[in-house]
Amino acid sequence: MLRTLGSRLAFCFILSVCSSLTAAEWSIPVAGNAFRSVPAPEGRRNGFQRDGILAWSDAEAVYSVYFHVDRAAALELSLNARATTGRSSLVARAGDTDITFAVEGTEFGLHKIGRIEVARAGYVRVDLRGETRNGTTFAEIRDLQVASSTEGLVVDFVKNNDGNMFYWGRRGPSVHLTYQTSKDAKLEYAYSEITVPKGQDTIGSYFMANGFGEGYFGIQVNGPQERRVLFSVWSPFKTDNPKDIPKEQRIVSLGSGPDVRIGEFGNEGAGGQSYLVYPWKADVTYCFLTQVKPDGPSTTVYTAWFCDKSTQDWRLVASFQRPMTHTFLRGFHSFLENFIPAYGHVERQANYGNVWVRSVDGTWMECAEARFSVDATGGGRHRLDFQGGARDDHFFLRNCGFFDQTSKAGEIFSRQSSEQQMPKIDLDALPRS
């Protein structure tokens, strides 16, 4: 369950409607800005219909609508909703205050909730739950209507579905660290470590450790009982459907470790994918090593290894050959994303530490600086809950959860040196098949 905002936002409901709050209005679509606070059990609907309308019958369900204000403000709230049969009674909560209001009528229209006072800039959360109903559902809701006469107020939220933004907005912003490396050296290996703090290993998280120009490698939380180590390489053929890739441009599997599954992926580019179902744990540090090396005039081999830092028991994930490619390591980066929209309201965070690259001549070079960036969900101000930085000897990334800290894209972070922890890996002894 998400934390309440009562500790940092002071709310006061006034049942009377203030007619002066008409200077500006915002319609906040539930399709891109509302979440079931505790996602429905597997196999049950979350309440959101294909047309974006929220309709539910579960009296235990709570749906939370989020929007961001840039200053203290007085806000008048209403719902654009209808009752499919008769009259329903709903309860809205902001902070620690509940108010009961009615929704009736079979046509969509505004149903007044009340007035709230927001004490400072930040995200506002409005919870909705059903109390009584005559029909099969408590209500059908399209939008939360916000009105305010607070001068200069800016309200940020996912405004429409252009570019499938309701989907991307519910997933939340993806954040990235691009490591500063030598422009002169040919780089063959990338090494990094990830520690996910306890409580930040949220379902739907992909903590990507070693990204490169043609793929990515990291750990995922796929469900309550399943976690994975994932390593993928894009095909040079541009498509979201792996079945469309011509044979001569397909990623070739050269080998994989025990229990690793090899397959294909699509939807965000397409190519070869490998994953290992592995019960990695929060508060444990894991090591990632990736080799990128040409093996001919027009092919390059990508190989990934993984281990628990405390044991140094390196295991092969997979080795892939990419056609139409002749390159060493380039574009070394890490990222953090949520890939399950129903969990886009829950925070996740990871520490990225002891980051190194190794040149073809065998020299290890530390990466102590990184450039921060965010995807279009954050860049377009659809979501503002994203952050990156450096603490002591590691970088960190944080997203989702509707927290109030926002980092600036393009910012350069510097961490303390971890020179004494330079990787000591016998590369010749690593498993390769």
Image (cartoon, helix red, strand yellow):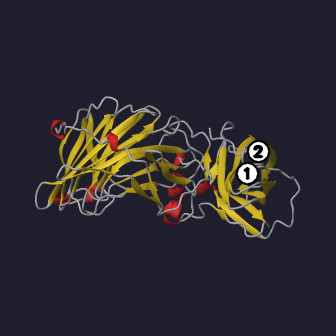
Circle 1: residue type: Ala
Left or right side of 374 for 309: left
Residue 321 image position (x, y, % from top left):
18, 52
Answer left or right for 393 relative to 100: left
Q: Secondary structure at mark 2?
A: strand
Disc 2 residue type (three-letter)? Val
Q: Residue furthest left?
A: 296
Of callouts 2 and 1, the N-terminal one: 1
Residue 91 has which mark? 2
Question: Pointer 1: what residue?
Answer: 83
Labels in figure, total: 2
As measured in the structure, the alpha-carbon distance from the residue carrying label 2 to the one carrying label 1 is 14 Å
183, above or below 319, in the image: below
Is the N terminus in the top left, top right, bottom left or bottom right quadrant?
A: top right
Observer-nearest of 74 and 349? 349
Taking the spot 17% from the left edge, 61% from the top edge, the residue there is 326
Choose mark 2 or mark 1, whichever is in front. 2
